[in-house]
Amino acid sequence: MNPYRQQMPYEQGYTVQVAQQNFLKHAALAEHYERLKIANAGNSTAYYRYAELQYYHKSRAIHFKGYFSAASWME
């Protein structure tokens, strides 16, 4: 392994608490953008912008949920 290579955030590992906090943060943001998306249903530009943000945060929430779901199986 190259000693000069910086360790990427996904390689550092997460504690269960950090994964849960990140899950809650991204889940809340996904819900927020869902509400904004619905509120801007008449404006297609804003609607799709909020839909993209909702999708991003929903996928991150699922990603972080995998960390603490997997950890609970290991105990």
Image: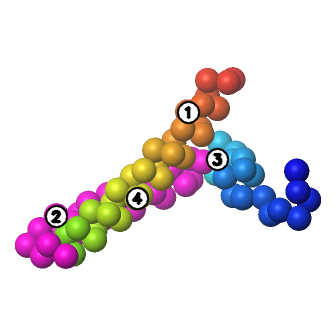
Secondary structure mostly seen in magenta is: helix
Figure check: 41 above or below 69:
below
Check if mark 1's residue and mark 2's residue have beta carbons within 8 Å. Answer: no
Q: What element carries label 3?
A: helix
Q: Badge 1, how many Cα within 10 Å: few under 14, some, many 20+?
A: few
- Closer to the eye: label 4 or 1: 4
CA neighbours of label 2 inside 10 A, class few (<14), some (14 to 19), many (20+): some
- Give the residue at mark 4: 56
Which residue in the structure is indicated by mark 3?
A: 17
For the point 60% across and 40% down, the residue is: 67
Highlighted magenta segment, given as a residue range:
19-45
Report the label total: 4
Label 3 vs 4, first from the N-terminus: 3
- Report the front residue among 74 and 49: 49
Residue lying furthest front: 2
Q: Check disc 1 and report the residue beneath it.
A: 69
Is residue 32 visible in this depiction of the protein?
no
